Image (tube, rainbow, N blue to C red):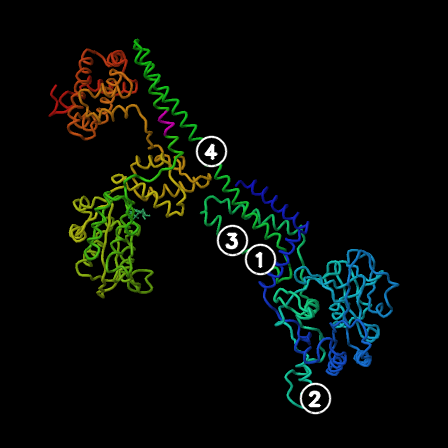
Amino acid sequence: MKNKHGLIIGFLISFLVLTLEIAKIPYLENLNSFFNQLKFKLRGQQQVDTSLVFLYIDDTAIHSLGGYPLKRSYYALLIELLTELDVKAIAFDILLLDKNPDYPERDNLLVLTTEKSKRVYLGGSFTSFGKSAEDTTQISKNLKKFLITGNDKNSNFLKGSNFLAPFDELLQSCAGLGHLNYIQRDFPEEIPLIVQFGKNQYLPSLSLELARVYYEIPRDSVKIFEDKIQLGRIEIPTKNGKILINYSGGTGALKMYSVLDFIKSYDAFKSGLEPEINMGEFKNKIVFVGFLSDVLGQTVKSPFQDKFPATGVHIMSLNTIIQKKFITKTGPILNFVLSFVLSVLILHLISLRNLSNVLRFGIFPALTFLLSLALITFLFTLGISISIYPVLTALLSIFLGMVYVFESERRKMIELENEKKRIEDMIKEKEMKIIELQREIENLKVADEKTVALSNLEKTYDEIKELTSKFEDLSEFSEVEKAEKVEFEGIVYSKGSKMEKVISTVKKVAPSDVPVLITGENGVGKELIAMAIHKLSPRKDKKFIAINCSAIPETLLESELFGYEKGAFTGATQQKKGLFEIADGGTIFLDEIAETPESFQAKILRFIQSGEFNRVGGTEILKVDLRIIAATNRDIEKAVKEGKFREDLYYRLNVVRIHVPPLRERKEDIPFLVEHFLKKFKSSDMKASHAVMNAFLNYEWPGNVRQLENAIKRAIIFAKSSGRNLIQLKDLPEEIAKSVKGKIDIEEKILNLLREKKFSHSAISETANELGLNRGTISEYLRGICFKNLYECEFDLIKTSMKLAENDVEAAEKAKKKLIEYIQNFIEIINQCKSENEIKSIIKLKYKNLPARYHFYLEEFALKFHRGELTLENLNQNDWNP
Ligand SMILES: Nc1ncnc2c1ncn2[C@@H]1O[C@H](COP(=O)(O)OP(=O)(O)OP(=O)(O)O)[C@@H](O)[C@H]1O
């Protein structure tokens, strides 16, 4: 995906999500509510302020106290006891709307204790919220005294009407009043701290009323603004009078007691017994009295608990204020910016073609998603609440990003197929042209015209060759037929290749302790072989240490391997163990052994003979149990002869010799090695094109397997960065790519057919028939092919005929006869010429029908012959019998 596309798609996704957010779609809002609860859970539980206590009346209490409704004298009793214990405030979350005409004495008692207590705060409830606030004149005088004066500019505040208040006498006797409404979607998330109730008049929530009491602020010092409520110097950030409740936890986070236990403890306390609840605990506390009963519908869903007491919601709201743990929601604009950044990041990661699919489509999106969740949780602990919408954007971006990438890859595949089809059509067209040209050549009588037609034919063959190569570069290379892959200790080869012998020797020598000398060019896999010997030996659980002797400076080599004593040389401040000691019991692989100095060779020899050595600068004789495997890419016998390598060491090391053949001698391994390296570089879905494999099979690989490995590593990067899963010629280094050979070549076709017919008498006529050409044309081609090969084999007749017949002796004999015939004819012509110029012009004249590309070889032969550099004798001394 281009960066520009990523930005556009990211913007569109974020904009769509912004629209959804503003539209407040119920389903998404519920999802958001669920997400908000999740944030609480991820953040974890915290303790509610110790100044808040909850005395609850549960179903057991209701039952023991004579059933519902409870006698109001019990409420009076509770108020009396709490007053006696000197609580700061009693928050009464039980609505007593009407007097009970049957028991006026109980109501009276309640009113009297409430009045006496001077610290009872009652709750009421709005049954409806409307567009305009209730008319002030209709609000009773008793109610009015609990209202807070503000201004009427706060038009976005909730406007309450139809307020259900406690019965009048009780209302008159209490110290304060607050509403008990909260805003519930799935769970009570917000509380309107202030509800407009009459012109310029506001009724606080019970929690705000108690916060005022907590901070001891007179009612007329409460100031209401659109974005905050001020309790004296305390500022509560709000949004149109509403506050988000910061739930500390479930009931576990509350300090709460059942009323039965409370009364029991009070009695014990009074009678001098040890109470279960410490009565001193209540002094100066704000005590909420309320129900905890599912039967009475007094529980709600909270982030930490499904059946959470409704009174707890007001406690949590008050706790939010007094602990100043306010939550701020990010608005749609900030959410949009966040969504955009997240979306662009995800789309960018998904489109990183150089990375594996698991990373792009799995790990990265999952990580981004999890990290954003972690960030959201972290911000939540700081009081910043991010909604679900940026998370939705992230999910949508992952989904759409994948669809985009898969779709563009599918389109690329289609384009590729179309391109292949186009090339195929072009090849068919050219093949038709060849048939036409062949017919034309048959019918032409004039030599000049024939030459032109022939060169047209050749050009068309060349064009087909190029198109075929292009076609092959667009098609995947599939499995090699018949060949069988072998993988042995990380060494990959084709069954039956030269590596089979190597591996069989490895298996034989591995169990013993004899030294092994591995020879072979650079990068053939010598170290891999050494490692395989180690892994198959009884030493497999001990160390295998490989040392490239030529990479370590001569002066360091000995101290690295044998270690040194303190003071052995400047800088040897401490004794140090060498690799020989470290590898004790294991195997040491000495790579490039032929590059080591004489003194080192002597020490190694001593070690092999006796298993003993000294540390550099030391006299103590050390003994370790090591197997030595050495390797070299040099002609070690030559080095011995030249005195550069100790002969005695050579014999000691050369007990078992393993020669690893160069890659060019085992090209059948190449397809399997390619597959192996694609897997090694985590690109199993990547394939090499036919043309690429063709190039690999034709290339000579001077750097062997290591060079192949590097070529594949580079090609994967190139192909991925162009969004391809197919390695093409353009991904290869120039020198490898140019070794590709097209399939169709007229010269090769003719030569192959002649070979098939073993250069027999009738071979030329039969070949002409099969190719739809006449005998003369084939004969001319063969003449050209003969002189070209003669030139390439340095005018060695035997070599040339063997090459023409691909080492088939019988066919080579016949090819040689043909060669001699062409040479004899040619010599007769050359002998007539006096000068080199004459030779050149006579070749043009006499060999008009010979395809022009071969004129050079005839000229070379003729000039050498004319100059006497080439004689009939030295063409081939033994076999030349004209
Ligand atoms: N048959 C094989 N199958 C799989 N990987 C191979 C094979 N042969 C060589 N390799 C890999 O090719 C690279 C070169 O191999 P290694 O280092 O063993 O060659 P070497 O002959 O020791 O080279 P040098 O002579 O430079 O030390 C390594 O990454 C190795 O894993």
Task: Name the side, left or right, on which 106 lies relative to 496.
Answer: right
Dominant SS type (magenta): helix
Q: In this rendering, which labeled residue sits more in front, label 2 or label 1?
A: 2
Residue on which the image places disc 1: 375
Q: In this rendering, which labeled residue sits more in front, label 4 or label 1?
A: 4
Distance between the Cα atoms at labels 2 and 3? 62 Å
Q: Residues within 10 Å of mark 4 (few under 14, many from 20)?
A: few
Residue on which the image places disc 4: 415
Residue on which the image places disc 2: 270
Q: At which x and y percent is residue 205?
A: 75, 66
Q: Quadrant of the C terminus?
A: top left
Q: Which residues are magenta?
A: 464-468
Q: At which x and y percent is residue 136?
A: 86, 62
**Closer to the camera in the image, 719 or 756:** 756
Distance between the Cα atoms at labels 4 and 1? 43 Å
Q: Residues within 10 Å of mark 1 (few under 14, many from 20)?
A: few
Distance between the Cα atoms at labels 2 and 4? 93 Å
Q: Are marks 2 and 4 in contact (CB under 8 Å)?
A: no
**Closer to the camera in the image, 94 or 424:** 94
Query: Which dot marks residue 366?
Result: 3
Task: Name the side, left or right, on which 128 lies relative to 698.
Answer: right
SS under mark 4:
helix
Q: As shown in the figure, which amino acid type bears the numbered disc 3?
A: Ala
**Closer to the camera in the image, 43 or 223:** 43
